[in-house]
Amino acid sequence: MTDMEMVQVFIGRDGTGGSPLGVFRDGTAVPGTAERQETARRLGFSETVFVDTVAGEVTVDIYTPSVRLPFAGYPLIGTAWLLRAHGTPAGVLRTVAGDVRTWTDGEFTWIRGRAGWVSGKRTQQYPSAAAVDALPAPPEGDGWLYAWSWADEDAGTVRARGFPRRGDAITEDEATGAAAMLLAGELGRDLRIRQGRGSDIVARVSDEGWIEIGGRVAVAGGRPL
């Protein structure tokens, strides 16, 4: 049996919200992209990761139920938090898109990446939070949609929902770090995002095109595969 651990990423201050993430800390137990893709499909999470550690370098291999991703936000934050919880250093996580620095600050775990690493996602602004809330899951159309509105533009607070629209079983992502990174890059400012039912995401625009994404993580359980 292969052990998979589960965490909730981007939970709110009250413990609600957060996207479920499946993590295989021993990626060698599920070798090969085809087997990993099938495992992610059977598990049915928005995203599942397989951690490969070679000579001290940690690589995170990320899958949705239907595609492999070169970069994603909440899987990296969740994996960094889980590795640290098990006493494994996680200062840098390697992805197909690039090396991602990670750190903790109080109750938040952070990653640092670039909006250009986010592929296949489109943002669309709506006139109000009520208009975002009223969207069906998913809205009509094709392609990954990050629907958002200002909750308070002066304060930089945003209401958002994420719709993969890939044709797999995921109709809506509760919380999405990569989409938050993309939006912060497009707007060029720091954001505090409330997504889904109650997820809390912080985005900070840093120097030289880097963007930092932070959130809370909690253990959600585990199960054998």
Image: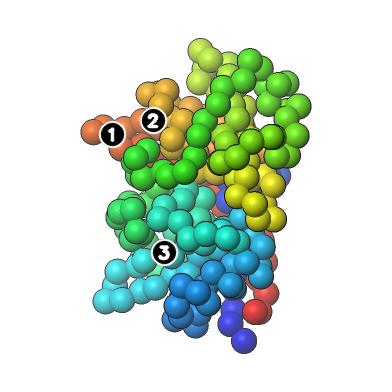
Image location (x, y in percent) of residue 186: 41, 26
22 over 1 or under it: above or below: above
Q: Secondary structure at mark 2?
A: helix
Residue at 44% of width from left, 70% of height from top? 51
Q: Which residue is mark 3?
A: 60
* Residue projecting furthest to the front: 141
91 over 5 or under it: above or below: above
- Tell me how the rendering is colored: rainbow
Circle nearer the N terminus (2, 3) = 3
Q: Secondary structure at mark 1?
A: helix
Q: Circles 2 and 3: CB distance less than 8 Å?
A: no
Work out whether residue 215 or residue 87 is closer to the camera in this orientation and state it: 215
Image location (x, y in percent) of residue 108: 49, 45
Image location (x, y in percent) of residue 193: 56, 31
3 over 130 or under it: above or below: below
Q: Which residue is mark 1?
A: 209
Q: Circles 2 and 1: CB distance less than 8 Å?
A: yes
The amino acid beneath tag 3 is Val
Which numbered tag is attached to residue 185?
2
